[in-house]
Image (cartoon, rainbow, N blue to C red):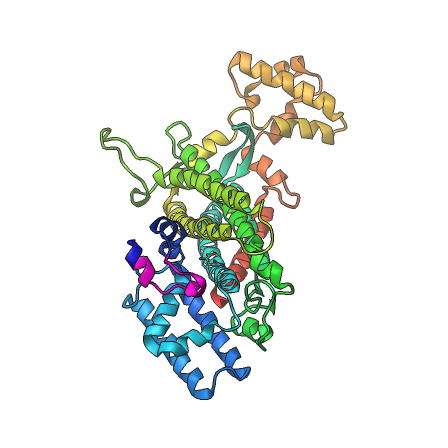
């Protein structure tokens, strides 16, 4: 931007200055390249503000009508791209004021009464985020649905899977149970965003620069018109507070962590060594040199993008930590991390939903692996406990059995009656009755357990939650 362009720009604070801004200041100061996406919300807030000024007797009927028509026209021009910010516009508010002045001349300047960019920008950002939280929730619900469809299919087939701790075979589970574990994490993300929205629904407009307004503006009416629950209770807090942005970044970062963990699982599942699942061609990538390769880049990018979401949160908290009340220009740095968080989630979620819904699980491999690694050892120990053996002794007896199997390279069920007795007198031949994967799974029949009936209950409850989340997202 040249110095001349800077000087010919609409500046909202030129009155007390004799010279225009230095180029270096203008370049540092400008935010329109990223805050332009607030234009829609800034215009909605301007309509509400114009009505308030009219009710306060500061605009007559004709002036209000002309202003609203001009805002409407400007809004359409923004949508078609016919009105664009120029290099000389400092921020979205400056650019839109220029657009209004171009349309209605000095009447456009009347809208400045009773508000400041400080309450405007805080209002716009809340509106943007509340709107986009709903879009993010809609996409989260789609990914949950993709996971639930796979879970439903594999629940019907009772597909077992090797349940792991420490990435080692632990106990068999239903594949559906494992898939629904990811749905649960995403449900918490949805709940967090919905809960966040309750706190974000406070309207700063009317707070002016920091102290409120001496003009009879009507913060309650503005708040209601813009879909907020209430106006801010403290004008100083209202223009200084960015908790809503930081909390949004946290909710996004934690959702990113959940996507990353799901991504990591997909990478493992689809590796040759696991061989639990195959990625559909549409969601796999190849290698430029190795013709045989089929890579899980979607899952890896989901894992990788968590880094930038966490970074955005960390950066924003760092920006906020030393600020005195009230508005400080540092706060302009609040936007890029939240915008990036929204963009990142809206990019990753549909790709993950597509990846999950088109993935083919290999039930045979999962079933073969489910009992591997002596994964039914706990079942034997718990059988002994049911017979009155203290768990400590049962654990030790079965531990010896496992070592015996490792030394003799066999499975728990292959040990003869004689050898069972040799290992421990507790190990009578009928302990073999619990050595079945389906039996072990069916036995975990406590709330939240992997028994088919419990998993079915879980799936039904999640379907209900996800439908409610999708409805909430569609409301806004
Ligand atoms: N572009 C600014 C921001 O995003 C708008 C508020 C400017 N206010 C001020 N007093 N300079 O924070």
Can the viewer see residue 179 in this picture?
no
On screen, residue 18 versus residue 393, left or right, reads left
Can the viewer see residue 314 in this picture?
yes
Q: Is residue 328 magenta?
A: no
Q: Position of residue 424 (x, y in %)?
A: 68, 16
Task: Report the front residue among 43 and 214.
Answer: 214
Q: Which of the 4 image quarters holds residue 461?
A: bottom right
Q: Position of residue 359 (x, y in %)?
A: 38, 43
Q: Which of the 4 image quarters holds residue 87?
A: bottom left
Task: Report the front residue among 190 and 395.
Answer: 190
Q: Is residue 13 magenta?
A: yes
Residue at x 61%, y 63% (from the top left corner): 235
Q: Position of residue 258 (x, y in %)?
A: 50, 43
Q: Is residue 325 above or below residue 79?
A: above
Task: Report the front residue among 257 and 28.
Answer: 28
Please give the range of residues in magenta.
5-20
């Amino acid at each position: 931007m040249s110095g001349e362009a800077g000087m010919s720009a609409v500046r909202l604070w030129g009155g007390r200055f004799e010279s225009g801004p230095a180029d270096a200041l203008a370049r540092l100061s400008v935010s329109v390249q990223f805050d332009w996406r607030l234009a829609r919300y800034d215009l909605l807030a301007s309509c509400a503000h114009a009505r308030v000024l009219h009710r306060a007797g500061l605009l007559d009927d004709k002036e209000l009508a002309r202003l609203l028509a001009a805002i409407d026209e400007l809004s359409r021009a923004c949508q078609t791209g016919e009105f664009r910010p120029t290099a000389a516009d400092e921020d979205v508010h400056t650019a839109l004021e220029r657009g209004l002045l171009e349309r209605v001349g000095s009447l456009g300047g009347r809208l400045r009464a009773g508000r400041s960019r400080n309450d405007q920008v805080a209002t716009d950002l809340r509106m943007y985020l509340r709107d986009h939280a709903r879009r993010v929730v809609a996409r989260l619900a789609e990914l949950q649905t993709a996971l639930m469809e796979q879970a439903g299919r594999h629940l019907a087939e009772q597909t077992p899977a090797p349940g792991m701790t420490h990435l080692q075979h632990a106990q068999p589970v239903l594949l559906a149970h494992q898939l629904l574990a990811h749905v649960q994490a995403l449900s918490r993300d949805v709940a967090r965003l919905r809960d966040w929205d309750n706190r974000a629904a406070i309207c700063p407009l009317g707070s002016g620069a920091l102290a409120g307004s001496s003009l009879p503006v009507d913060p309650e009416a503005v708040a209601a018109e813009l879909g907020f629950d209430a106006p801010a209770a403290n004008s100083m807090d209202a223009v200084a507070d960015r908790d809503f942005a930081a909390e949004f970044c946290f909710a996004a970062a934690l959702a990113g962590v959940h996507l990353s963990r799901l991504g990591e699982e997909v990478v493992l599942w689809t590796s040759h060594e696991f061989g639990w699942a195959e990625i559909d061609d549409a969601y796999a990538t190849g290698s430029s040199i190795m013709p045989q390769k089929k890579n899980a880049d979607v899952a890896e990018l989901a894992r990788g993008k968590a880094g930038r979401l966490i970074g955005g949160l960390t950066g924003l908290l760092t920006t906020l930590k030393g600020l005195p009340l009230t508005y400080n220009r540092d706060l302009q740095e609040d936007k890029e991390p939240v915008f990036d968080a929204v963009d990142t989630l809206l990019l990753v979620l549909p790709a993950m939903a597509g990846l999950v819904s088109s993935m083919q699980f290999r039930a045979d491999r999962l079933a073969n692996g489910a009992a591997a690694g002596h994964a039914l050892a706990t079942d034997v120990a718990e059988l002994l406990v049911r017979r009155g053996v203290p768990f400590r002794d049962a654990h030790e007896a079965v531990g010896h059995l496992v070592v015996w199997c490792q030394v003799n390279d066999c499975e728990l069920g292959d040990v003869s009656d004689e050898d069972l007795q040799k290992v421990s007198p507790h190990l009578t031949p009928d302990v073999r009755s619990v050595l079945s994967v389906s039996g072990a799974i069916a036995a975990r029949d406590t709330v939240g357990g992997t028994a088919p009936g419990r998993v079915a209950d879980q799936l039904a409850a999640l379907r209900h939650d996800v439908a409610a989340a999708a409805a909430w997202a569609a409301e806004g």
